[in-house]
Amino acid sequence: MSDDTRLQQWVVDELAFEPRVDAAHIGVSVRNGVVTLSGRVDSYAEKFAAEEATRRIKGVTAVAQELEVHLPSHKKTDDAEIAARLVRMLDWDVLIPHRGITVKVEHGYLTLGGEVEWHYQRTEAEADARKLSGVKAVINDIHVRSAIRPENVKARLHAALERNAAAQADRVSVDVTGTKVTLTGKVNAWTERETIERAAWSVPGVSEVDDRIGLARP
């Protein structure tokens, strides 16, 4: 059995195991570690969950997302109603600033704009948007403004990686230009890469992260 064939079976099994995904209409193909997901799902949340489950698999180097969201007729929602629901959700979410985020919905495609102080606020707003029925895709154009400029972002990031059990700091190179962090190196799994990127975003003063970390083939 080739590496790609084994990886394909692992992805198929993981999608079938993931309770948020109905794998019946999802096709999986693999070439040189790159997984392509095709077919259809009933919601954007399910599409995101399918990609998230695929990235968990050891040996996946990239995901080509070709899943289409086909909303059942009873889940189709007016754009104005989607926008109004999200505005209410953002108002209730204590992790997100009350003002500063804009919402635009056109034919089910939802665009988030504005500025926040932290990356986690940006991702939290997107997570709220994914939960709404009627959404076909989420475009996150929220910018992170730099309110703090520490003198040594690089040292803080390395210290954070060394504290984190899921990240191997010695396998990652960090370059800091102003408030932009560029990450390079090789890790064993996508989850480790995500852990390192989250650590970079958590350093006060970081306004941009360029994640160039690659995945080592097993």
Image: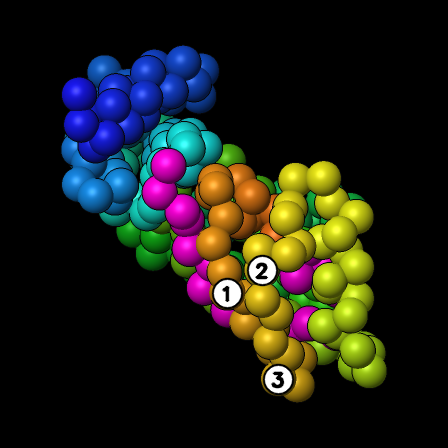
For the rendered model, the colour scheme is rainbow
Q: Taking 210 as reference, is 123 above or below it?
A: above
On screen, residue 90 versus residue 108, left or right, reads: right
Q: What residue sits 71% from the left and 77% below the top? A: 146
The part of the chain drawn in magenta is 198-218
Instruction: Find out whether residue 216 is within the magenta segment.
Output: yes
The N terminus lies in quadrant: top left
Return the residue nearer the eye: 98 or 47.
47
Q: Where residue 204 sits: x, y (%)?
A: 78, 68
Instruction: Find out whether residue 19 is within the magenta segment.
Output: no
Return the residue nearer the eye: 19 or 30.
30
Q: Please, what is the three-letter code of the amino acid marked with disc 1?
A: Thr
Q: Please, what is the three-letter code of the amino acid marked with disc 3?
A: Thr
Q: Please, what is the three-letter code of the amino acid marked with disc 2?
A: Val
Return the residue nearer the eye: 59 or 35.
59
Q: What residue sits 37% from the left and 37% below the top? A: 218
On screen, residue 187 versus residue 13, left or right, reads: right
Tell me the crowding category of disc 3: few under 14, some 14 to 19, or many 20 or more residues within 10 angstroms, Cα based.
few
Q: Where residue 73 sits: x, y (%)?
A: 26, 26
Say if mark 2 contacts mark 1, CB within 8 Å. Answer: yes
Mark earlier in primary sequence (1, 3): 3
Secondary structure beneath label 1: strand
Per the rendering, the mark at residue 45 is none
Q: Which residue is mark 2?
A: 172
Q: Which residue is mark 3?
A: 177
Q: Taking 66 as reference, is 203 above or below it?
A: below
Q: What residue sits 65% from the left and 40% below the top? A: 166
Q: Which residue is mark 1?
A: 184
Tell me the crowding category of disc 1: few under 14, some 14 to 19, or many 20 or more residues within 10 angstroms, Cα based.
some
- Choose mark 1 or mark 3, whichever is in front: 1
Return the residue nearer the eye: 151 or 207.
151
Mark earlier in primary sequence (2, 1): 2
